Amino acid sequence: MHLSSRKVSVNIGRAIKEYEVIEEPYAHILVETNKELHGWLSKHRECTSERLLLNPYHGCSVGCFFCYTKGYDFGYFKLCQEEKVVTVFKDFDRRVASQLDEIKIASCGYLSPVSELFSELNNKYQITERIIKEFIKRNIPIEFITKEVISKEVLELLKQQRHSFGQVSILTLKEGLRKRLMKKGATTEQLLGNIRSLAKSGIYAVCRIDPILPFLNDQKEELRDLIKRVRDEGASHIIASCLDISKIMYQETLNYIKNFGISIFYEYKKLYQESIKNCLHADINYRKRIFSFLRETCDKNNISFALCMEFEMVKDKIRGLNQEFMSSENCEGINIPIYIKRGKYFEPIADCLGNCLNCQEAKCGLRELSQGNEDGEKCWKLSDYKRWSKSINENYRLF
Ligand code: SF4
Ligand code: SF4
C-alpha cells in the first residue's frame, strides 16, 4: 500500500485497486461495493438476537485509543491504519435495498460494528440516513451505536418503526477524561442529550459503558453517578464490558496507557494476563467484581443490564458471563421479534422474543435459528436468509 500525492492502492484479495484520495472533510476514498448483508461473524459471542450487520464506512474518525479495529490489518482497515484514509462505500444503500427486496425474513439491521456512522463524512454523503430509510420504508427495525450527535432526521425516521432503537456510548461523565480516551466524538453533554432525545421521541435508548478501562473509568462512585444520570435522561438499559486488548495491539495500547501515569501502566501489565483466543483480558476476579457492582447498581436503579462479549475460561471451554450477570432477556435490553414479509411490508411474528441464542422452541418454524439446544453459535449469511425466505409461511400469527 502506498500513497503518492493523491492516490492510494489497496489489496483486496488477490487484486490491487487504486483510488484517488478526497481530502475534505478528511482523507477518504469512494468505493463501489458488492458487499452483502450478513449476520454476526464470531462463533464465540453472547449476542442473543440475530442482526443484519451494515458497515457503510471502514475506518473511523472518532479515534478511540482502544479501538478493536486497529487489530484488523487487512484491506480497507489497513488503509485506515497506515494512511489514515477512510473508505466510503458510496452505493451501499442501493445494495442494501436490493438485498432486502430478495428476502422475506429479516432481523433488525445494525449500524455499524466497525465505524462511527454519524461522522463528518456522513454529513457529506448521508449514507447512514439512506440505509435507515431503506429499512424503515419496508418496516424492518434498525439500530445503531454512536459516539456522535444523532440527527433530527434519524430520530424522525426511527420514531416510525416500533422496534428500532439507539445505543449511545458514554464511558464517563468527566469530559476531560473522555477527551483523553478519544480524539473526536460528541461532548459528554451532547451524548447525554442523545439519550434524552431518543427517550423523548419514544425510542428505546441504551447506554453503553463499553469498555470500562481499569483504573481510568472504573471508580464505583463515578459509575454509580453515570448509571443514575443516564437513567434520569431516559435510558432503559445499560451494556458494559471491560477493555480487552488484542495481542497485536498490546504494546501500542500499553504505551498509550503510560499517558495516564507509569503506575497505571504497571497495573495493566499485572492485570492483563488472561488469554482468550487472540486477546488479553483483565483478571477474571477484577472483572467479576466490577460486573457484580454494575448489576447491583442497575437493579437498585430499576434499569436492566447486560455485558457485551465477556468470557471466562472454564476447564478449557469459553463460557459467556451473561449467564451470571445479564438481567434482561436480550443483551441489548429490547426484545425484537424476527420479521417476515407480508405483502409489501415486513411484520414482527408473535411469540418470539428475538433471543435466538437461547431459544429452544423456534416458534418461527426455523429450527436452525434457535440455538438454545446447540453447542456453539452459528453465523448466518444473506444466502441463509434467502433460503429461509423460500420456506417462510406467510400465515404466521403476527405480533
Ligand atoms: S467509535 Fe468505535 S469504531 Fe470508532 S474509533 Fe471508537 S471504538 Fe473504534
Ligand atoms: S422464535 Fe426463537 S429461533 Fe425463531 S426468531 Fe424468535 S427467538 Fe429466534
Image (spheres, rainbow, N blue to C red):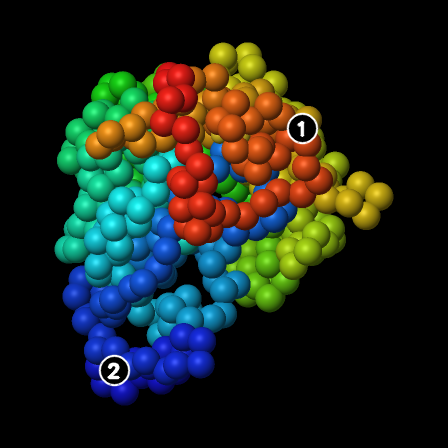
Q: Residues within 10 Å of mark 1 (few under 14, many from 20)?
A: few
The residue lying furthest to the right in this view is: 315
Where in the figure is residue 105, as x and y percent of width and height? 38, 36
As displayed, is residue 224 above or below residue 59?
A: above
Q: Position of residue 250 (x, y in %)?
A: 61, 62
Q: Nearer the viewer, residue 62 or 118?
A: 118
**Spatial CA span between label 1 and label 2:** 49 Å
In the picture, measured across the screen, residue 393 lies left or right of residue 27, that is: right
- For mark 1, give the secondary structure: helix
User: Looking at the picture, how far across and down is residue 217, in whole percent?
Assistant: 52, 38
Q: Secondary structure at mark 2?
A: strand
Q: Is residue 82 above or below residue 179?
A: below
Q: Amino acid at mark 1?
A: Gln
Q: Nearer the viewer, mark 1 or mark 2?
A: 1
| Residue 7 - label | 2
Give the image quarter of residue 208.
top left
Q: For the point 47% across and 59% down, which residue is it?
A: 69
Depth order, front residue of 88/399? 399
Residue located beneath label 1 in the image: 323
Badge 2: how crowded within 10 Å, few (<14), some, or many (20+)? few
Quadrant where the image shows the N terminus: bottom left
Q: Earlier in the sequence, mark 1 or mark 2?
A: 2
Callouts 1 and 2 close, C-beta under 8 Å: no
Work out which quarter of the rendered image holds the C terminus and state it. top left
Of 139 and 6, the residue lying toward us: 139
Image coordinates for residue 40, horizontal then vertical, percent: 50, 47
User: Of residues 387 and 155, which is closer to you in this image?
Assistant: 387
Q: Which mark is residue 161?
A: none
